[in-house]
Image (tube, rainbow, N blue to C red):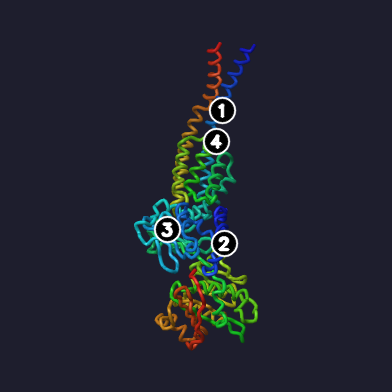
Amino acid sequence: MLKLFGAVLILLSGTLAGFHQAARFAARPKQIRELILAMQRLETEISYGFTPLPDAFRRLAGQLGEPLRSIFRSAASHMASGSGITAQESIQRSLHDNWKRTAMKAPERDILHQLSFTLGTSDRQDQIKHIALAAQQLKHEEALARDEQAKYEKISRSLGLLIGALIVILIF
Amino acid sequence: MWYKKHLLVYKRKAHGLKRRQLGGGRITNPNWLELFPDRIKSILLALPRELLGKLEEVRIREGRPLEVNESGGHRFVTGQGQLTLDEDKAYRPNRDDSRRFLDLISNHSLYTLEEELRKGFITVPGGHRIGLAGRTVLAGGKVEHIRDISGFNIRIAREIRGAANAVLPFLYDERERRMKHALILSPPQHGKTTLLRDLARQISSGSIGATFAKAAGMKVAIIDERSEIAGSVNGVPSFDVGSRTDVMDACPKAEGMMMMIRSMSPDVLIVDEIGREEDAEAVTEALHAGISVIASAHGSGPEELRNRPAMKRLMDDRMFEAYVMLHRSRGKTVFRVMDRQMRLLQLQAKGEAHHA
């Protein structure tokens, strides 16, 4: 009886792990898409609104959903804190603190990291170019992420169950 | 807010400041130190406090010694906050310092300062002005903006209430109850702008001189092409320029004068550093419209002014009813007032003053 209960438990957790992995595969392109939209909004804020970076980030945070919201919000609060840290450091610090909560992977992080070096440090045209470039790169990553999703989402869901089953078989 | 942290330090220093305020003028944004990146801020905070309150300029040049100026002259600053004249001992701000400084003064957003970069200076809260030097980018033969900014000149603004006390009675026409048309003349850094600012404040609040019966305040319009008189940030003056004063910030003088005459119906127009043909035209226009103009111009005396055709015409037409000549030596500002026919009316010492 106890054995049966353990087996069910292992099967269940295997399945759950699989579903969780599948959900991450599904969430990644969605979050990248959201990030691209955020980049486009940032571009508008800079080119038409002349909005200072902290305000622009705060506004973006208001429009975005979690987990992207906290990335922009904490970067904005770092910038406005008045403790003398630059925009670049604010963004990098925020990425470091909040990245784990997203489903995104290293390439997207690198793109934002790269962008942080130029944000706020040049004239509008230059800023727009850099943001557009980041958006372009993100789109590329999005396409890759969608491919991965198509390939691995279903597999990982069934794989979870199967690995659970394998462990059960091996144990018995 | 960004200045909160520094407020504590400032409170601790309040005692020392009070003494200095007498001679040094009121610093409207005592937290100007907050503008600097940490490293330079800690160096400046280590300076003798007496000096810190009298500073007029701080100069940051990438790779070259950090320099501070007060009315007495220039000094370099070492990494420990000691004054020196020896270049080799001085602290040399590096690329990181200037990059950080630029990031902080632009509120992390250099792209919002395109107009300022074209003009070569930024006005920050408190009316302090930061002059910039670097490599310019041209478009159509004109300076589009500055990039690779490596030189900063932070001019610390102080307002001196009462700077105009002694001059004001000479500029008030008691019979007609209006201000005379006046031209203020002095070399740079001798207190023209400070005087204009206090004139604006006193005229608009109606406290015209201590000896005069309290007149009603007049409507004052300031055309502040270089954001020096009012030190406006986002269109709101940082200095007290009076409650009935309108400020047209960063506006070309001639155009601004005409706009003000047409739209704001001022009694008194205050404008800094006139000299070009179109300025003279606008001044004439204002005088004919019955608006008093108080203007300033570079020059140590009326003779010098005659060399400029536009100004010569104004003087030949006897447009101004009073001329005020300022001269500052050893911290004392002396002024002379002359009337329409260039007759000397008064010679007087005005006491200690600083440029702003």
In the image, what residue type sits under mark 1?
Answer: His
Q: Are marks 4 and 2 on the same chain?
A: no
Other residues around mark 2 within 10 Å, as few (<14) / some (14–19) / many (≥20): few
Nearer to us: label 4 or label 2:
2
In the image, what residue type sits under mark 4?
Answer: Arg
Subunit of label 1: A
Position in image of residue A87 (x %, y %) = 49, 49
Q: Secondary structure at mark 1?
A: helix
Query: What is the CA distance from the residue labelled 4 to the residue labelled 3?
Result: 48 Å
Does residue B12 appear anywhere in the picture?
yes
Side of B40 where A3 appears, left or right: right
Read off the residue under disc 2.
B15
Q: Are marks 1 and 2 on the same chain?
A: no
Nearer to us: label 1 or label 3:
3
Q: Secondary structure at mark 4?
A: helix
Query: What is the CA distance from the residue labelled 1 to the residue labelled 3?
Result: 61 Å
Query: What is the CA distance from the residue labelled 1 to the residue labelled 2?
Result: 63 Å
Other residues around mark 3 within 10 Å, as few (<14) / some (14–19) / many (≥20): some
Query: What is the CA distance from the residue labelled 3 to the residue labelled 2?
Result: 22 Å
Dot placed on the residue nearer the N-terminal end, 1 or 4: 1
Other residues around mark 1 within 10 Å, as few (<14) / some (14–19) / many (≥20): some
Please tell me which residue lies in front, A158 or A160.
Answer: A160
Q: Are marks 3 and 2 on the same chain?
A: yes
In the image, what residue type sits under mark 2?
Answer: His
Read off the residue under disc 3.
B82
